[in-house]
Image (cartoon, rainbow, N blue to C red):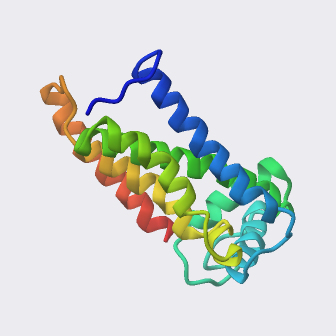
Amino acid sequence: MPLKLPGGPARLRIASVVLAVVALLALRLPTNIVPILNVDEADFAVESGVLLDGGRPYVDFVEKKPPLIYVLYAGGLALVGRHNLPGLRLLLIAWIAASAFALAGIARKVLGERAALLAAPAYAVAVSVGPPLDFHAANAETLFALPLLAGTWLCLPADGDGSRARWLRPFAAGALIVLCSLIK
């Protein structure tokens, strides 16, 4: 049964995006007043502060995580304020929204429009419903999802791909997967 709505598929896509964003805001903003949600978040913030002071990972601070998590934290905290983890989590909401839309793009290519319309809001809810100490913290698992999903999307063939695009897509997908391994 085809989906019908006045205004066509564009209106359905807009409704899907709005639903995903509303779900993220409704489920995540209430816990965003807590300064530190878990120990990983605190560690990443402290270690990124060393980077912001010109320090070097694995030399000026010791931690077992790959380096890109600290770079992402340092960049985010440089934007919102060095000790502002709630501000960083607001940036995380945008990151999660981008991840949800990447998942919708994958669903559209693999399963069709109906699945794509459900994918973004479902992802927004799935990554937000759970213990806030784990689910709402700006953690490596949440941050590595976007390059992973973008890399997966690039692995899927696109209509009208020329020979150059067919070569570049897997290369770019691989680069994104490498980024994932540097985050988590």
Q: Residue at x 40, y 43 (%)?
A: 104
Residue 174 at x, y percent in the picture: 29, 53
Given the current orientation, which residue lies at the most extreme top position?
7
Residue 157, quarter of the rendered image: top left
Given the current orientation, which residue lies at the most extreme left position?
163
Q: Residue at x 87, y 63 (%)?
A: 33
Q: Quadrant of the N terminus?
A: top left
Residue 59 at x, y percent in the picture: 64, 79
Q: Is residue 17 above or below residue 161?
A: below
Residue 164 at x, y percent in the picture: 18, 29
Q: Residue at x 49, y 23 (%)?
A: 11
Relative placement, left or right, of 145 versus 69 is left
Q: Residue at x 47, y 30 (%)?
A: 13
Q: Is residue 52 visible?
A: yes
Given the current orientation, which residue lies at the most extreme front position?
1
Observer-nearest of 116 and 54: 116
Observer-nearest of 175 and 30: 30
Q: Is residue 60 visible?
A: no
Relative placement, left or right, of 166 versus 63 is left
Relative placement, left or right, of 54 versus 151 is right
